[in-house]
Image (cartoon, rainbow, N blue to C red):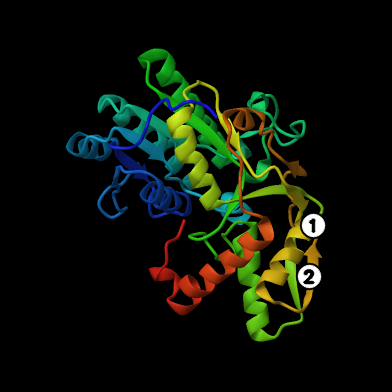
Amino acid sequence: MADLDFPLNGQRVFVAGHQGMVGSAIVRALRGQRRCEVLTAPRRSLDLRRPERVESWMRRHRPQAVFLAAARVGGIAANQSRPAEFLHDNLAIASSVVEASRKAAVGKLLFLGSSCIYPRLAPQPISEAALLTGPLEATNEWYAVAKIAGVKLCEAYRRQHGCNFVSLMPTNLYGPGDNFDPESGHVIPALMRRMHDAKAAERDSVAVWGSGAPRREFLHVDDLADACVFLMERYADAGPVNVGSGQELSIAELAALIKDAVGFRGNIVFDASRPDGTPRKRLDLGRLDQLGWRARRALPSGLEETYRWFLAAWIETGPERSVRR
């Protein structure tokens, strides 16, 4: 296991985007694993797209470490219908927080990218070296371009200003705090919601976008948060680090697992008129393995846990009071 480069104990740590799925998981990990002061700023009090407001907040609170987990996110439908939002907001968030961190002399910043930054037909498993070697997947290119810019922004600040800014690329995520809207959510929460609604309405089938053939890798958000804390303390190189589970399955296999977790007894129907997205996406975890970190949660049990959270946060209390990504 790599030695500690930047111990978090005793530090003031700002989690940008703490109300989202990833940010809230990082807050849980920090409070459960480290003796540090966790700083947060609700959306209503700090718009991370506004540079002057972010810089003012940084001057007042003087964080020593920053986890940049804030982002405008969504599934294929959201990316296709709101491309300007996905590009503008994510560019603005990254540039505002990174520049404010430099001006505030933050000791270390960790930027959360996404595996969608890699080319659509990148060799599998996808290594970090695949970045910018081919065309992106068209269904989420706006988000991907913004995330690539964030990665390169961190590299540029390292080169020009000597900032200790690092990036990691998580695979597809799921877990507590996700967006379970059936139209704008990612594949796991959207399918979970559709199957839950179908079970409640006693419908006999649920439609799944695409052919079911694409293969994906999924990581529980609490495993990602653990990796974020691990890499913040131990990784200090310029290149990004892939973070994943190392396990892949088809969308059809995933749908069957979600069906079991929800207890839906109807049929799964694949709508081939809808886009599949990237045919296959599994990350090369060699760099992460060398550092000494591996995911711990199995997908079936993680899906069951996520469904229990969904029932409590979205059904029993309502989505407006739940933590949403």
Q: Position of residue 253 (x, y in %)?
A: 78, 59
Q: Amino acid at mark 1?
A: Gly
> Disc number at residue 118?
none
Q: Which residue is mark 1?
A: 212
184 vs 88: above or below? below
Q: Which residue is mark 2?
A: 268
Q: Along the horizontal axis of the image, is 61 left or right of 192?
A: left
Report how far apart the C-alphas of labels 2 and 1 lie in the structure: 10 Å
Q: Position of residue 18 (x, y in %)?
A: 38, 50
Which quadrant holds residue 281? top right
Q: Along the horizontal axis of the image, is 14 left or right of 240?
A: left
Q: Is residue 273 visible?
A: no
Which quadrant holds residue 105? top left
225 vs 164: above or below? below
Q: Secondary structure at mark 1?
A: loop
Image marks 2 and 1: residues in contact by CB distance under 8 Å: yes
User: Which residue is found at the position 81% from the left and 59% from the top?
Assistant: 272
**Which of the two discs, 2 and 1, labels the residue nearer the N terminus?**
1
Q: Is disc 2 surrounded by few (<14), some (14 to 19) or many (20+) residues within 10 Å?
A: some
User: Which residue is found at the position 47% from the left and 54% from the top?
Assistant: 21
Q: Quadrant of the N terminus?
A: top right
